[in-house]
Image (tube, rainbow, N blue to C red):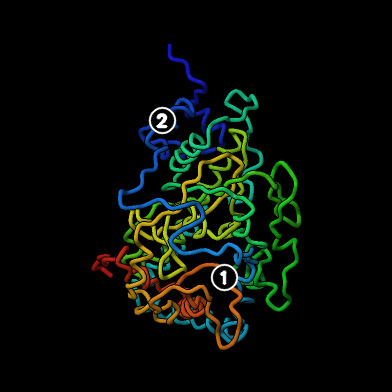
Amino acid sequence: MTKYHVTHTEKAFTTHFDLPSHVFQQSIASDTFHDLDEVLASQLAKNQRPWWVSPLEINHPTCEINWENIHRFDGRESLHTIHSLAKYIGGIQAVYDSINSGHRALLSEIRHSRLTLFRQALIEGSRIKPYFAKTFLGREHAETSSAYREPITWQGTPEENLGILTAAARYFGAYTIGTMELNSLERKLLFTYPRGNNNPPAKYGKTKATTNDFTHDWPPPNDIIKPIVFEDVTRAYESANRYVIPKKKLWIVSIMMPPIRSTHENSSIWGPRYYDNSYRTHTAVQTCLQDFLRAIGYQGMGYMDDTQGLLPAAAAAILSGLAEVTRNNNYCFCPKPQNNSSYFSMITDLPLAPTGPIDSGVFRYCHTCFKCATVCPSGAISNHSEASWEPPTFEGMSNEYTVPGKKLFFNKTHLCKKHSLEQSSECNLCLATCPFCSSLLNIPRSF
């Protein structure tokens, strides 16, 4: 009789991870794993790059980085908050004017366009969340033990650990993952504060206080938007006024969600909806990965809610080799499966082999291609021939939403954000025009 290290039936597996059975059935598909050794040997654990993609030295992607000038960014100063955006587009009232203008335009379009109504229906459908929500450390009640309720800690090499985590991430619904070490240098990538929930102020119908409630009384108190701090502890924890990350050996995991090429091929309908949808599906992936890590004796530190991560997702994707930077530095491009995708991040104490940045020729191509910059209706994308170390300034104002230390084609992102508010949706013409992810989608004629 064949004997396995740990054998899980469907019932035991779903009970152990507290998952509904249909999640198990959808994830497992035709694969059956009796233990982690079989997971490691499966195709799910393999991550082959295309032949034209070249590996680069750790922390040296195709865009040059001066780590001395990189510093931790206060996420509350991102352009997702009214407080920050107001500095660059004429004040707080100008932000509200743009929002109201977008709402009026949207209502008018819905009345006269079946296509706009369809788009809004996709938005509402994408906002339906799974039965659990994202949290910093996941569901704390999940068992830290084997199927037999005996405390265990999985012991494997960093390469083996990368394999089982890759397999687990795909098993739970991700496309793949990339990894990098979190040392003193990479700590500069982590936010000092997350950006906070950037929904409209609570007085407009929200029951939970948000960043935008404190636009006129800045900054928000630490029990509303908690700082991210490092402490000499063995395990991460969350208190009433801070998120705590241990000062020990850690690793960053970049999580790439399954790309849908057609979502970027028509800017006005599908493009913005892909990101709505990926935030929803990432909720399940993150929660399952946190439970998986806890079950083998480790922690996963993830998004605090729908949109709040510990560090910029694009930075993790680029430095871990899932993607390469582009002319439009609001996005990064994955050479396999040749698309702009949606990325998220997590920190773990499971030792992992770093996957390293890549050169697929994308950033070099962007130096001579100006299509996204030409088509951008707000003029937010740089049309320069060479990348620059200097973030742009605006009428003498310092650029507080861009961290220096990178040689990029810097965007004037506040112009893009203002245009999006006035249109009540991202136009995504840059993605629809990009040679790497374009070719127009055929919209049903009934529209």
Q: Using the rendered image of the protein, determine whether residue 103 is visible from the camera's viewpoint.
A: no
The reply to whether the C-beta atoms of the residues labelled 1 and 2 are less than 8 Å apart is no
**Mark nearer the N terminus (1 vs 2):** 2
Considering only vertical position in the picture, is 10 above or below 141? above
Residue 422, x across and y down, in percent:
48, 81
Residue closer to the observer: 330 or 359: 359
User: Label 2's element?
Assistant: helix
User: Label 1's element?
Assistant: loop
The residue drawn where x is 57% and y is 26% is: 147
Q: Amino acid at mark 1?
A: Pro
The residue drawn where x is 50% and y is 75% is: 413
Residue closer to the observer: 428 or 73: 73
Horizontally, is 175 left or right of 87 in the view?
left
User: Counting other residues with Cα less than 10 Å from the Cα at mark 1, is it few (<14), some (14-19), or many (20 or more)?
Assistant: many
Considering only vertical position in the picture, is 13 above or below 63? above
The residue drawn where x is 49% and y is 55% is: 319
Q: Which quarter of the rendered picture does the N terminus lie within?
A: top left
Residue 316, x across and y down, in percent:
51, 55
Residue 202, x across and y down, in percent:
66, 69
The residue drawn where x is 51% and y is 55% is: 59
Residue 35, x across and y down, in percent:
48, 26
Q: Which residue is mark 1?
A: 404
Q: Which residue is mark 2?
A: 41
Horizontally, is 331 left or right of 309 in the view?
left
